[in-house]
Image: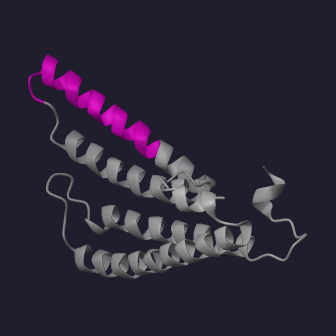
Amino acid sequence: MLKGYLIVGSVAIVILTLSTFIQVITRYILSSPPSWTEELARYMFVWATFLGAAVALDKGLHATITVLDEKLSPRARNVLKSVTTLFVLGLSILICAESIRLCLSTMSRPSPVMKIPMACVNVSLFFSGIGMVVSSVDTLLSLWKKPGEINAKEEHA
């Protein structure tokens, strides 16, 4: 569902790797790496991390404790999953709201080396929150569907 997030996150990892490679090579060959490589790698790591968190939520890859889940009836398991997903949805909405405030407050603050607005880095948190909201709503809709209905996740499984 969040294919664009996966693509952008993958590009961020490639840029992070290339930036780090350039830094290491120039450090050992020229004894003076470009100052922007470390900052770029750090910011790409932030983007890959936050987009990856949304993708992991969408694919159900976050760590879970299944001791209670395994002992519940299917109906009770559905209720538990609904409650936890509603909690994640609430936190995701909070992340979106607070990331907007963060971006607005860092719009005019330049990064130390590359001099880009720090909001360009911080907006990754907003996109992560949006992805988690979309994933949570999709999960809730699939949990609350009527018996016999088929959702998109089950069709592709």
Compared to residue 13, the image places residue 95 above or below, namely below
- Corner quadrant of residue 125: bottom left
Specify whether 110 is left or right of 92: left
> Which residue shows up at 52% across the image and 76% down it?
89
Which image quadrant: the N terminus?
bottom right
Front one among 12 and 86: 86
- In the displayed image of the protein, which residue is found farthest to the left? 31
- In the displayed image of the protein, which residue is found farthest to the front? 71
Q: Main secondary structure of the magenta part?
A: helix
The image position of residue 98, as x and y in percent, is 34, 80
Compared to residue 2, the image places residue 13 above or below, namely above
Front one among 17 and 145: 145
The image position of residue 105, as x and y in percent, is 24, 79
Front one among 115 and 98: 98
> Which residue shows up at 49% across the image and 72% down it?
88
> Which residue shows up at 10% across the image and 28% down it?
32
- Corner quadrant of residue 95: bottom left
Q: Which residues are magenta?
A: 11-32
The image position of residue 138, as x and y in percent, is 67, 70
> Which residue shows up at 41% across the image and 41% down it?
13
- Residue 135 appears in view: yes
Residue 24 counted in the magenta span: yes
Residue 16 counted in the magenta span: yes
Compared to residue 141, the image places residue 9 above or below, namely above
